[in-house]
Image: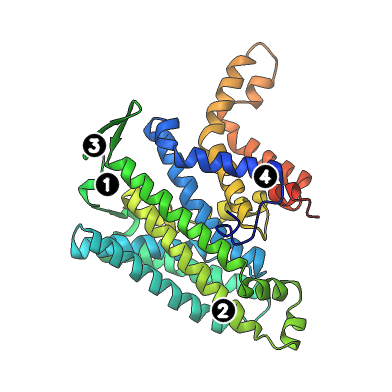
Amino acid sequence: MNRLLSGDSPKSIVLSVLLVAILIALAFAPFLFPGSRSLETAARICIFIVLVASYDLLLGYGGIVSFAHTMFFGIGAYGVAITIDRLGTGYGALTLGALIGLAVSGVIALLIALLSLRVRAIFFAMITLAIASAVAVLVSQLSGFTGGEDGMNIRIPRELTPANRLGEVMGTRITGKTLNYYLVFGGSLFLFLLMLRIVNSPFGRVLQSIRENAFRAEAIGYRVVYYRALATCLSAMVAALAGSLFAIWLRYVGPATTLGMEIMLDILLMVVIGGMGTMYGAVVGTAIFVLAQNYLKELMGGLSEATGSVPVLPELLSPDRWLLWLGVLFILSVYFFPTGIVGRLRGTR
């Protein structure tokens, strides 16, 4: 197990139990939580764990602030969609689309890094924001190629669709959608373990030293720009693969679902809630945030009805105010867990 985790153990009994609980819940989601909505939530958690972990490689380990991460996520998703649209349905087209998205993301990330990483952090962040906004506008306008604002529907192999019925296991109906979920789960688990290996490698250690003091790292012989550029490329390519998995699962790609600034803000919130500079923070932060997004509104509806006889409280707990309470929960988490939930559980100050 220590080898599988690249020597980065949770270092906390509470955190270990929490991570195991999340792993079991995701691994057996089709059987533990029947229903399409529960499966959608579990698949989204799997994909966003990878997306948030890849962003944490930049922000938490490299100290690089970027607002272009959803751009690479979208490139991976559109790579699959456009390839299938041109070449037809098939596993070869799916694989080729994912590889194209991976390659394009790596090249664009390298160009951005080499041209922009020498400037101060805030200016680099603004450059990435401008590039991401330009790509989002371009995707929306190239309707003949990307589907424009309407997006693109994706035809995946029939074996991965609900039409493929495979019988029942433990009272749960198994279809192609279940196989599709386990494709997403397996791919996400592999990518997460790969990220864990990267940050615990000598490269990851150097990246952390650059984050702490770039001048000292440069003084002892490390080419800071090269390391940051490599981190940017690795982060972008993993984000593109997460986008490919998202496209295969959702069977639809559109500007709002992959390139929206709201997704970038969600990623930032997940990183902060879970804890920057730790891959496990991506797991915990994503699980909490996605569950809150999907079920907080319903929970508040039930609480509002239960407190109907209490003055003012039902209005405060109205489901229409779920975003307000999500914001309150975020503020409280930052106040009580300044280093994130994982940082607090590990005893990091």
User: In this rendering, which labeled residue sits more in front, label 1 or label 2?
Assistant: 1
User: In this rendering, which labeled residue sits more in front, label 4 or label 2?
Assistant: 4
Q: Nearer the viewer, residue 21 or 107?
A: 21
Relative to 172, 303 lies left or right: right
Q: Residue at x 56, y 21 (%)?
A: 302
Residue on which the image places disc 3: 166
Q: Earlier in the sequence, mark 1 or mark 3?
A: 1
Q: Residue at x 65, y 70 (%)?
A: 62
- The CA span between labels 4 and 2 is 32 Å
Q: Residues within 10 Å of mark 2 (few under 14, many from 20)?
A: many
Tags 2 and 3 touching, CB below 8 Å: no
Relative to 35, 287 lies left or right: right
- The CA span between labels 4 and 1 is 34 Å
- The CA span between labels 2 and 3 is 46 Å
Q: Is residue 143 visible?
A: no
Amino acid at circle 2? Ala
Element at label 1: helix
Residue on which the image places disc 1: 160
Q: Residues within 10 Å of mark 1 (few under 14, many from 20)?
A: some
